[in-house]
Image: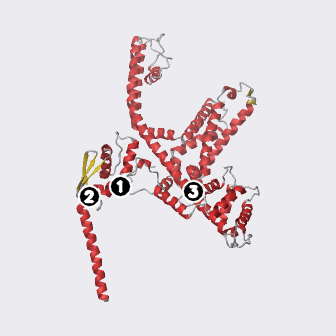
Amino acid sequence: RVGLSAAMAKMQTAGKTVAKLASKENRLLQNDKIVTVNVSGKLFQTYVKTLRRMPGTLLAQMVEPDGELLAKGRTFLDRNDIAFHAILSYYRTDRLVKPVDVSDDQWNDELEYYKIENPMQHGPTEQEVTKKFLERGMPVADGWRKQVWLFYDDPSSSTLASYQSVFGVFVILLAVMCFLAQTHPNFRLGMVDEWNGYPIEDIKVFFVVIEAFSVAYFTIELGARFYVNAKKWNFVVSVPNVIDLVAILPFFIDAIPGVNGGGQLMIVRIFRLVRVFRIVGMVFKLGKYSAGAKVLGKTVHGCLRELMILTVVSVMGVVIFSSGLFFCENPRLDELSDTSDFHSAVTGLYWAIITMTTVGYGDMTPTTTCGEVVACAAALGGILCIGIPISVITAKFNMSYHEMLSDLQMEENRKKFIKAKREIRGLQGMAAFGSSIESAVGKDSMLGKLFGGKTGQSSKAVNMQAIMSVAKKLFIEMDKDGSGTLEQYELDVAMKQLGFDLADGSIAFMMGQLDTDNNGVIDFEEFKIFVERAVKGDLPTSDDIKEKRNALNKAAKRPAHAPPRYAAW
């Protein structure tokens, strides 16, 4: 019997192996089969193996062993044939390009029908974001250095980080406005003693205080970011960080004895140059927070060749037209003309630049017929010399602009993802908090641990009055400052005592759920409502949390058939 059983097992194993080999051979034979897809009357033919390259998509499912397209060899789809041409090309080349003649909404509908994910609507995964942050110098190990890095470089990492980002923009705007106000003659030269009832000297002191505060704030920020950054050299040579240094360095140069208020001409020029760099640095620092400024910088960086062509052509035109105008306006080179302002070709350089850029101030004009002809040629030539390269730069700007919109959409999706994670943690905290109130009033319960065994009640025959009595004791115990209300930090302390170390966003979510009147604190009446919900079972259950987590995981997971992004996040 033992031998017969062993023989039967070997036969079953051999049978499975033969069936598997036969299935694999049959699948290989099917791969070379040509199928026909009729899309609104237009026929498309391709191999089965081509459609199987993107598993999970509609066409890949139709050529599975039980699929309609594989069985019949043909199918009809009442869809857009122009869009299908691009979709079939995606199966062949792994490149998804939207046709020009198809609108964005129609393209999205077609991709949804064919079960292909639109790469422009997919946000970065958590792993991609972490990899990007590590490349920028985020510390690998968890700790205060990583928290400081996220505080300054990732506004969506916490509520305080988002507030810091907004406050940084406010400080920059305040510093720039104060600098501009200081140039007014009333403040710069002291032409009046008061301004709107405030002494001029006090206003000057106010300007100095604002400037010192802004420089100190950005110095601390730059120093902290440099200290916690894991890639110091990349941090130093980064253009945004160089801009940050330029914004604060002039203040310290200005503080050097002898630079400000020196009597020598060179010292005065250095002081004025330092002042210029200070405002330039602040303005460029403000550009760090602007998506539009980043698009402009990216366009300039990507159009260096076109800008070089524009510069060379412009210089050639300026030299040619300024020289031509000089000879037209000065027919006798051995004497100085009394009727023309163009006494040299160098003087004509300024006029040529203003004319070729079609600005035309009118402060310098030709007085001869020959000079007027040269001026007309300069105006028309400027349109050709500048307009043609500008069209190429404009096209690249549009491309960078659309990429910026895609990145903003991805960042928005990432913020929603982080918010959803915090809500899940908040729901878990609410469920645990509510269940502890509902079921545990004894010494060994979670509430008993929170009270330190002060309740001393039995968990049997618990009625609403007993629960509210326990809830009152719990509320008083949680109210650390005795104000009669619970603030966010007090709720955080209570949750930690119960064994739940929640992030700031999760605690804020719980506060929003308990604070029914949205006044920022929880009074006992609101706490009673929460307790009643807990007793009635009207709180998030494990199934609710599981469903939300599954939806979050599904949104965060990148499908295997997702095409590559047009631009890296």
Q: Position of residue 538 (x, y in %)?
A: 61, 60
Marks 3 and 1, how far apart in space?
Answer: 32 Å
Quadrant position of the N terminus in the picture = bottom left
Rendered position, 145 above or below 207: below
Mark 2 vs 3, N-terminal side: 2
Which amino acid type is shown beneath numbered disc 1?
A: Thr
Q: Is residue 84 above or below residue 430?
A: above
Q: Which residue is mark 2?
A: 70
The tag on residue 57 is: 1
Determine whether, in the image, residue 237 is placed left or right of residue 151.
Answer: left
Q: Quadrant of residue 252?
A: top right
Please name whichever residue, 19 or 210, is drawn nearer the observer in this view of the structure: 19
Kindly check if marks 3 and 1 are in contact, taking CB atoms under 8 A apart as contact: no
Residue to which mark 3 is pinned: 423
Cα–Cα gap, marks 2 and 3: 46 Å
Colour scheme shown: secondary structure
Q: Is residue 301 visible?
A: no
* Percent coordinates x, y for residue 417 in the rendering: 52, 54
Q: Residue at x 58, y 38 (%)?
A: 282
Q: Amino acid at mark 3?
A: Glu
